[in-house]
Image: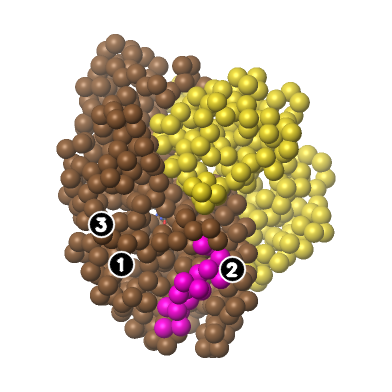
């Protein structure tokens, strides 16, 4: 029985994408991260520490760039749930990386308003400039290019998110070289961020 | 002329700070509300006619009154700052430029429903806003507007900002609750409704950021003032997001008797390059596209339904004559395919299939039966899913076929798009 009588099952449709990331190196939170996490847990009822799992995973990512099997086991132990519970979360939310990524992850919004404003050209230009395809990392490990869905700033289209926390807005294909060179020279400090007032002033 | 209230100071340098907010009359409504009974607050909000700004337009006062008073469990307020509907960026502006209005609204709403804890669930991508909000929240706590024994009244209300990690579905209220509990953002079967069994099994109200930001204004200026703005049953100031092919994209505050034409041509400066308008999505990607003949309709909850669409999150996406509507359907279906939570079969399987058919047409391999097949698949999704995501994902497909069937047929017959768009890349770059 299929979802629709004409649905061509058996031709590569309906493939589960379930996978388990590699165990990776041994992992434990730094004392600072551990303390920060314990503080965050106080925002929830004592028996609800699991609510802090997303925050814990962000800390893993801050510590080692991406999330490994060993890191998930450590998070499970600290939060008080099973590794499967943690894996469930890691594989669901798009802001977690399960594979190594570049120092700077450039995620170009591809959804309608950005696309209507030339996002495809921005991605193409970025890929050309860095000699990669989407989802690939440059040979020097500096940049990963990805596509992303609507970032909630469609008036500032096209938008690029850098490392899940920093934004570059109103990026035309012509701005790509400046963005990349700026990151190479001055790192994240080269981004102007998301500042309405600054922008309109 | 209508004067903005929610966004009055958004372009003012320093307008987001506690000092500025207090100097301009901020936290006065909180003082008033502390002197009112919870019932009186709910009643005032009911009389104002405030309807939720998150998408469905459900009356806010009524939602609050569903929270059982005799339930001994703690009660929670969850503010929905997930803002993931494509085309929507109004909450972004409030979070960035007017966080204290939100905090003040949270404390008042908590008092109204008997909650002592409020979580602001903010999408993970808004982290740069969160840092600034945390700093402002700490100041509000120190000044006694938030936290224990607020302004010496004996009332407690803690506000915590909870960061998500990228999932459109986390905006659905029960999925948001699941996510807050540390799980995948997958919706729960209703009933029971969150007002009775919500976060941690306790009574919970989920409200949109803009909804909560209206609350201090209603308390301060009165429900008559609020009800006097805009058409009957569609009252109060409203934020509209305009993006796409317009000269001045942005967030505009206006009453809901403003027409689509006024928003696009007066507020947003008209179509870029003075091209012809082809179609408009009036309320975010999940609302059906409208043709230019509907431009004189009011942008109200009821006006948009009458025009054959929905106000949704009031996200107006404007498309000019160079836009291929088959590509629009494919672009948005890609979004829904990417974001489907996978919990129920019609959505999980169906949206993937819709995308594959649209992609095939776009590559020039469409077959004559494909339009009927798309309609048939939509028919197997619409109304048959666990949450409204299913109806959302078919809206772009159904409405573009309804208005632009000829474009689909030409595309399939000739294998090429009948419309050339200069904003697209010459070669496809997408990873999928
Ligand atoms: C798939 C889906 C996504 C949603 N996303 C959001 C969102 O990002 N922000 C929001 O406020 N409401 C969103 N909603 C609506 C919420 O479920 C809920 O109705 C709303 O937060 C209630 O607040 P209100 O009564 O103040 O409008 C979404 C609903 C669905 C079905
Ligand atoms: S309709 Fe889609 S998003 Fe909603 S529960 Fe079903 S699979 Fe999940
Ligand atoms: S479509 Fe790119 S930010 Fe919304």
Q: Secondary structure at mark 2?
A: helix
> Foreground residue, B11 or B283?
B11
Q: Do the residues indicated by labels 1 and 3 lie within the same chain of the protein?
A: yes
Question: Sequence order check: which comes first, mark 1 or mark 3?
Answer: 1
Determine the secondary structure under disc 3.
loop
Residue at the spot x=60%, y=75% of the render?
B141
Range of magenta residues: B15-32
Q: Quadrant of residue B215?
A: bottom left
Q: Which residue is mark 3?
A: B256
Q: Spot the yellow chain and give its letter.
A: A
Q: Residue furthest top?
A: B414
Identify the residue under disc 2.
B137
Which residue shows up at 50% across the image and 73% down it?
B23
Residue B33 appears in view: yes
In front of the other: B307 or B414 = B307
Where does residue B400 sit, x and y in percent of width and height?
Answer: 27, 32
Q: Above or below — where is A128 with respect to B396?
A: above
Label 3 neighbourhood size at 10 Å, few (<14), some (14-19), many (20+)?
A: many
Which residue is at a point 45% across and 61% down the rendered structure image? B9
Pick whichever, B66 or B303, lies toward us.
Answer: B303
- Residue marked by disc 1: B50
Name the tint of chain B in the rendering.
Answer: brown
């Amino acid at each position: 029985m299929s979802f629709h009588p004409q649905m061509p099952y058996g031709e590569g449709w309906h493939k589960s994408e379930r996978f388990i990331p590699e165990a990776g190196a041994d992992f434990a939170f730094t004392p600072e991260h551990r303390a920060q996490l314990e503080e965050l847990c106080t925002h929830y009822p004592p028996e609800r520490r699991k609510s802090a799992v997303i925050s814990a995973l962000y800390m893993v990512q801050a510590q080692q760039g991406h999330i490994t099997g060993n890191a998930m086991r450590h998070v499970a132990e600290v939060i008080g749930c099973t590794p499967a519970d943690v894996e469930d979360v890691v594989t669901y939310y798009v802001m977690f990386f399960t594979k190594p990524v570049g120092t700077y992850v450039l995620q170009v919004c591809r959804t309608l308003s950005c696309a209507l404003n030339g996002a495809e050209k921005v991605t193409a230009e970025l890929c050309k400039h860095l000699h990669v395809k989407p989802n690939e990392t440059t040979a020097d490990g500096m940049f990963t290019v990805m596509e992303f869905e609507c970032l909630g700033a469609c008036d500032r289209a096209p938008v690029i998110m850098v490392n899940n926390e920093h934004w570059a807005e109103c990026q035309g294909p012509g701005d790509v070289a400046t963005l990349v060179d700026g990151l190479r020279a001055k790192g994240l400090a080269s981004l102007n961020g998301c500042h309405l007032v600054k922008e309109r002033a | 002329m209508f004067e903005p209230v929610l966004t009055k100071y958004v372009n003012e340098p320093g307008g987001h700070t506690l000092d500025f907010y207090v100097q301009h009359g901020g936290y006065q409504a909180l003082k008033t509300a502390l002197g009112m009974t919870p019932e009186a607050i709910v009643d005032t909000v009911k009389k104002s006619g405030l309807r939720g700004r998150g998408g469905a337009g459900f009356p806010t006062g009524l939602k609050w009154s569903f929270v059982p008073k005799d339930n001994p469990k703690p009660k929670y307020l969850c503010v929905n700052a997930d803002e993931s509907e494509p085309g929507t960026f109004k909450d972004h502006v409030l979070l960035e430029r007017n966080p204290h209005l939100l905090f003040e609204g949270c404390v008042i709403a908590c008092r109204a429903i008997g909650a002592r804890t409020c979580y602001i669930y903010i999408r993970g991508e808004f982290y740069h806003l969160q840092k600034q909000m945390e700093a402002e929240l700490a100041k509000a706590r120190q000044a006694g507007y938030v936290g224990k024994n607020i302004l010496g009244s004996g009332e407690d209300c803690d506000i915590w900002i909870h960061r998500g990690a990228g999932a459109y579905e986390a905006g659905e209220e029960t999925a948001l609750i699941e996510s807050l509990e540390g799980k995948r953002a997958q919706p729960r079967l209703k009933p029971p409704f969150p007002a009775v069994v919500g976060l941690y099994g306790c009574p919970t109200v989920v409200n949109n950021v803009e909804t909560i930001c209206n609350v201090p204004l209603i308390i301060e200026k009165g429900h008559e003032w609020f009800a006097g703005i805009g058409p009957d049953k569609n009252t109060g100031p409203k934020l509209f997001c305009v993006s796409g092919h317009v000269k001045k994209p942005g967030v505009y505050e206006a009453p809901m008797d403003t027409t689509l034409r006024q928003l696009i041509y007066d507020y947003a400066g008209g179509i870029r390059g003075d091209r012809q308008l082809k179609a408009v999505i009036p309320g975010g990607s999940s609302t059906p596209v409208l043709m230019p003949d509907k431009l004189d309709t009011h942008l109200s909850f009821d006006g948009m339904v009458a025009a054959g669409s929905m106000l949704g999150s009031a996200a107006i996406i404007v498309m000019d004559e160079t836009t291929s509507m088959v590509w629009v359907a494919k672009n948005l279906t890609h979004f829904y395919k990417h974001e489907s939570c996978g919990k129920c079969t019609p959505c999980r399987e169906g949206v993937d299939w819709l995308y594959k058919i649209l992609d095939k047409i776009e590559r020039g391999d469409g077959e004559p039966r494909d339009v009927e097949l798309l309609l048939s698949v939509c028919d197997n999704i619409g109304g048959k899913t666990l949450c409204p995501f299913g109806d959302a994902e078919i809206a772009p497909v159904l409405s573009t076929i309804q208005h632009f069937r000829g474009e689909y047929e030409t595309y399939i017959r000739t294998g090429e798009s009948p419309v050339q768009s200069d904003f697209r890349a010459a070669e496809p770059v997408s990873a999928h």
